[in-house]
Amino acid sequence: MKKHFTLSDLIAIGATLLVLASAALPLLAAVNAGSRNSACQNKLKMQGSAIALYAEDNNDYLISGNVYSDEQANNHLRNNYDSSKVRSGRIVLMKQGYFGQKEVIRNGAEQLAARKKYYQCPDDNKVFSGTFDSYYLLYYTEKWVPYSYRFGKVDYARDLASGAGDPGNIIACDAGIYSVDAEKNQIIHAGFTNALTLDGAVLSRDTTQALKQKSIINALRFGAQFGNLDNRTK
């Protein structure tokens, strides 16, 4: 005798499936978050490899944040980038093939696509744009070296690869690690940052205290009051 499902049976089955789906959703979300975080860390590793290869070709100088072809003799940047205009060091790494292939960038759309490939964190839907990448490029020593237009001077590549810097020092990390980022609602990862060290390692650090700092330098410095992001002590 064939049994037919009653309305009560169908409701019970539907309720069971709903409970199972509800239980699975957090697990699925966690898996997806872990996958995105792994992709973020892999991008930082790729940046580390590209920066290291650049340094090998340029007397141990790390790529500067900005590159001025007409002042290479002054800032020790021997990158042969043929342009009279300032270019981001990140663009130089892509165009010169330090990621494994030379990116052909003929217009803004192609540049944006290339930047997304190497410099956009999969978790970032707030910071990355036509002018900003998901990651800070950070080189500072005991004697702070000017960068961008700070103090009205051009950038200088930091020869940290020659031994002047601690291998554990952070040279790049996610944006969203200090109070200015928080005020602008530009936090990529909730409660932590992924960071690249000089020796190419990728680590994750808590940003609870760092987010209270008004300066990105203070946010990175070693010490409980600064969030313990970096290995340097001064």
Image (tube, helix red, strand yellow):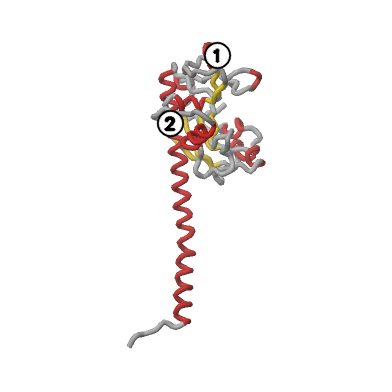
Q: Which of the numbered marks, if any, corresponds to residue 200?
A: 2
Q: Quadrant of the N terminus?
A: bottom left
Query: Which residue of the protein is positioned furthest toward the left in this rendering?
Result: 1
Residue 9, given in percent of the width and then of the height, sits at 44, 80
Q: Which of the numbered marks, if any, corresponds to residue 24?
A: none
Q: Which of the numbered marks, if any, corresponds to residue 70?
A: 1
Q: Quadrant of the C terminus?
A: top right
Tag 1: amino acid: Asp
Residue 36, given in percent of the width and then of the height, sits at 46, 46
Query: Which residue of the protein is positioned furthest toward the front in this rendering?
Result: 106
For disc 1, the neighbor class at 10 Å (few under 14, some 14 to 19, many from 20) is: few
Dot 2 falls on a residue whose secondary structure is loop
Mark 1 or mark 2: which is in front? Answer: 1
Q: Is 75 above or below relative to 166?
A: above
Residue 140, given in percent of the width and then of the height, sits at 55, 25
Pick the front one: 126 or 95: 95
Pick the front one: 118 or 57: 118
Q: Is 196 above or below relative to 29?
A: above
Q: Residue at x 43, y 23 (%)?
A: 54
Tag 2: amino acid: Gly
- Reading the chain from its start, which is encountered first: label 1 or label 2? 1
Dot 1 falls on a residue whose secondary structure is helix
